[in-house]
Amino acid sequence: MGDYMIYMILTAVMSGIGMLVSARLKSKFNHYSQIPLSNGMTGGDVAKAMLRHYGIHDVQVVPVSGMLTDHYNPANKTVNLSEGVFASNSVAAAAVAAHECGHAVQHATSYAWLQMRSKNCTSSEYCGWNATMVVHDSTGCFWDEFESNYIVGDDCSFYGNPCI
């Protein structure tokens, strides 16, 4: 068996694992989307409260279109929450909002791993290949063709040119 065949088998296995993880994530998200927070806060409210709690006043929380398209953009200091997360008062929305704000907290506190990812993702020239799937938080940094900047995010859809 040649190197190419081993590569193809590993790619198929990793793709299968990625699809299983993605399906499980969506299933859990759908389940916890049905359970409201007892305090009635929306995902947008949770994000803003968390940023206030950590004394971060230069990051905006904004709604974006799509499902599970949530991400933190350190270039323009925005926590971008999908419309469903931004407006929902569910446990899932609160968890997603808190997760994305965690990236903003990492950025504000100069978290070493985030700094390393940012340094490694300074130009698309250094990213030698395109990909259709980025494993969640393997580096967390990839080029967003739609916004033309680097983002830290968690969407496992096509973004191209991941910096890994």
Image (cartoon, helix red, strand yellow):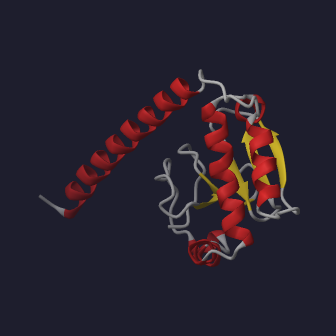
The residue positioned 50% from the left and 63% from the top of the image is 129
Residue 15 place in picture, x, y as percent: 36, 45
Q: Is residue 14 left or right of residue 157?
A: left
Residue furthest front in the image: 38
For the question of whether residue 46 can be seen, the reply is yes
The residue positioned 68% from the left and 76% from the top of the image is 110
Q: Is residue 102 left or right of residue 83?
A: left
Q: Is residue 161 left or right of residue 122?
A: left
Which of the two residues, 39 or 153, is positioned nearer the viewer here? 39
Q: Is residue 76 above or below residue 28?
A: below
- Residue 119, by quadrant, is bottom right
Residue 94 place in picture, x, y as percent: 66, 39
The residue positioned 50% from the left and 47% from the top of the image is 132
Which of the two residues, 65 or 26, is positioned nearer the viewer here? 26
Which of the two residues, 2 or 16, is positioned nearer the viewer here? 16
Q: Is residue 74 above or below residue 81?
A: below
Quadrant of the rendering where the N terminus is positioned = bottom left
Residue 133 place in picture, x, y as percent: 48, 48
Q: Is residue 41 above or below residue 70?
A: above
Q: Is residue 31 left or right of residue 15?
A: right
